[in-house]
Each structure stands twice: as structure tokens, then as C-alpha cells.
Image: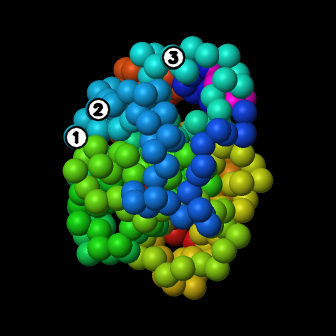
Amino acid sequence: MALRASGSGCRLLRAGRGGAFPLCPRGHCAGSSLDPALKAFLEENTEVTSRGSLTPEIQLRLLTPRCKFWWEKAGRWPHREPYWAVYWPGGQALSRYILDNPDVVRGKSILDLGSGCGATAIAAKMSGASRILANDIDPVAGVAITLNCELNQLDPVPILTQDILNLERGRWDLVVLGDMFYDADLADRLHQWLKDCCWTHRTRVLIGDPGRPQFSVHSIQHQLHKVVDYPLTESTRQDNNGLTTSSVWDFQP
């Protein structure tokens, strides 16, 4: 699947952006509004797994080599590129850090920006966060996040499937984001938006990244303090072009 270029063995990077299933209305998704056909499609075409990541205590529905769409040609997946279906190393590091340090989120309001599979939001909920919003622009990711919450015996978290960078900045105690610095233009937008959050609301920002080139050379590096490094599991290394570690960074503009 063409996600290989971004680090996974999956072949569907150029998947079609249309879809045969109704998605979540008005940019929001909740467990009670899941479309039965889409829910059944994801349950049939993903594998529940907790192996090979930094957080074996979290179960997730992901695309794996056991799934037929892992091997399918581009365009066969009936939705936009399934980036949510990979547990990326930056998200793994953030989730591991939160599980190991629950005081970081306990009793606090959390925005999981670019939530993907929802693992970091799930880790925050497991660790006692008082309010969580998972944000991902792919509505299918919103459905997957809800299913993943249920897999872990958690009530679904609220989900926003609009581009939050275009919306008025909310007040959050902590913003977490992993693997989001993969494109120069997006990185610039994120940098400014995160600075505004910090300056306006004194929001803390934690970033997870395995050291991708776009992140390592971006000007945000001058405003980061490394919190922790984690060695990646062998399977994650193989799926991410040999990257060996992933880090959590504290953004201090």
C-alpha cells in the first residue's frame, strides 16, 4: 500500500477521496451517530491489535498485513488516505509518556490535534483527563476513534472533524500532537497556531516526533525542550524506514 512512502508497509496512500458511506454530520462524530455500514466496513477491514507498539495496554483497530486493503492497489479504499489506520511513532511516544506520567493530564482539558487512531486521546482518558477533544480532518478517523475507545472499555471522546487551525482557538490546558510536521506549509501553520495558543491561554504543548527531516530542520526546533526518548519496537522500526527512536518535546515559545 502506498503509505510505504510515509513509513508504513501499506499500499493505499493514493486512495480515493470519495466514499460509499455517510460520514459524521457537521464536523462532529459521536458513538451514537455512527453509520452502521461504515462501522461494519471498518470492523471487517481492520485488525484489533495491541502488539508491536510502545503502548501494549491500548488496543486499536489498524490496517495490518492481515487486512486485505494492506495489499490492495491505490484507489480501492473507498475513502481518503487512511493515515488514521497506522499507529505512527510520534503518537506512540506521546501515549507512552502520558500513561507513564498521568499527572501531566489528570484533571485537565486536553486537545489531541491530528488524533488519527485516537491512541493519545485514549491514553489521556485512561490517565484521568477531565475533558478531551480529538481532532482529525478525516471523518472516517472519527469513527475509528470511537471504535477504539469502545475497544478499551471507554466512553467515546468528543471528536471534531474540521480543520481546527481555521477555527477560533479554544482554551485548553494541554495540546498534544504527534507526527504532524511532515509538510512544510502545514508545519508553518501549526507553529503559528501553537504559539498563539501558548501566548493567549498559557496552554502547554507536547509534540511527539521520531525525528523526521521536516521537523528536525523547522524553526520550531529553537523553541523545544526534549522531555524523553523512547526506543521503538522492531516492528515499528521496520514500518518506518528504520527510525529507531521517538521523542516527546515540550514547546516553549
Badge 1 or badge 2: first in the primary sequence:
2
| Circle 2 residues within 10 Å: few <14, some 14–19, many ≥20 | some
- Name the residue rendered at 58%, 82% in the picture: 199
Q: Magenta segment: does it hold 35?
A: no
What residue did someone put label 2 on? 50
Q: Secondary structure at mark 2?
A: loop
Residue stretch in magenta:
11-15
- Of residue 69 and residue 5, the one placed in the foreground of this image is 69
Residue 208, image x and y in percent? Answer: 47, 49
Residue 98, image x and y in percent? Answer: 30, 55
Asked if the residues shown at circle 1 and circle 2 are in contact, with their CB atoms under 8 angstroms apart, the answer is: yes
- Name the residue rendered at 69%, 30% in the picture: 15
- Of residue 246 and residue 19, the one placed in the foreground of this image is 19
User: Is 231 drawn above or below residue 184 in the view shown?
Assistant: above
Question: For the residue marked with disc 1, what is the amino acid?
Answer: Glu
| Circle 1 residues within 10 Å: few <14, some 14–19, many ≥20 | few
What residue did someone put label 1 on? 57
Badge 2 or badge 3: first in the primary sequence:
2
In the image, is 114 to the left or to the right of 112? right
Question: For the residue marked with disc 2, what is the amino acid?
Answer: Ser
What residue did someone put label 3 on? 68
